[in-house]
Amino acid sequence: VLVLSPSSYGKGARKALARHIYLDTAPVLLGFTVLAALISLVLTRIVVVTALSYGLSRYALEMLIRVLVLELIPLTAALFVAMRCTIPNGSQLANLRRQGRFDALTRQDPVRVELLPRVVAGVFACVTLAALSCVVALMLAYLGVYGFTLAGLPGYTRMFGHVFSPSVTLLFVLKTVFFSLAVALIPMAAGLYDTGKRALPDSELGGLARMFAVLLLIELTSLMGNYY
């Protein structure tokens, strides 16, 4: 409700939101893109060599796109954002509550001031990393199969359109969105309702376990929708 409310984006709120989006996205953007590129290169080489050895080279590119873009990269981006950004942000919320600073915001809505920017920043970071890394993976998969030539572009685009049918594209978008919501909301909720009775590492591990369970459920639902 707060995300869709125009009153959540006043002058001060926009400044805090922009700061959190920058801090959660910019420092990790290059590192995760390089990581995704390395993973894409290694998997591309493995799949291409294996497919050639079994005479199945025409299926190599489609399998790469299904494994990398549809399944691996969105999940990796969600886990990366969770461990790098949203779980530490949830711990910051818990510390604010323990120190009494969260309850001291009596004239302002603490959920709107402290929670909302962190949630929106987590969603934005997850979607941005996943989208950019998917583009990088698609480019590297093409280069790994066809090399530096445009001769394979027509066949590549036809295969891409075959893989990304309307139903698969819808499931891919929904999965990425639900991944981003899971990694943004679960750690924030854990920090917001933390009672201070648990040690900080236990709190983080508990949030990570709950998040793994939700991400696994979303991934299984996506697999069932794509392949059954």
Image: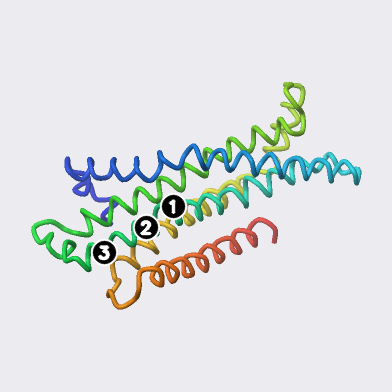
Q: Secondary structure at mark 2?
A: helix
Instruction: Note whether 219 is above or below 37 in the view shown.
Output: below
Q: Which residue in the protein does label 3 denote?
A: 95
Q: Secondary structure at mark 3?
A: helix
Give the mark nearer the N terminus: 3 vs 1.
1
* Structure colour scheme: rainbow
Q: Residue 88, labelled with which disc?
A: 2
Q: Is residue 23 left or right of residue 156?
A: left
Mark 3 to mark 1: distance in Å? Answer: 17 Å
Q: Which residue corresponds to the image point at 52% horizontal and 44% vertical from the top-left?
A: 130
Q: Secondary structure at mark 1?
A: helix
Give the mark nearer the N terminus: 3 vs 2.
2
Q: Which residue corresponds to the image point at 32% horizontal and 65% vertical from the top-left?
A: 191
Where is residue 123 drawn, in percent x and y?
40, 50
Q: Which residue in the protein does label 1 denote?
A: 84
Residues packed near mark 2 inside 10 Å, few (<14), some (14 to 19) or many (20 plus): some
Question: Residue 25 lies in what quarter of the image?
Answer: top left
Depth check: 101 or 166 in front? 101
- What amino acid type is highlighted by mark number 1? Arg
Depth check: 8 or 94 in front? 94
Asked whether the residues under the numbered discs 2 and 1 touch, taking CB atoms below 8 Å apart as contact, a structural biologist would say yes
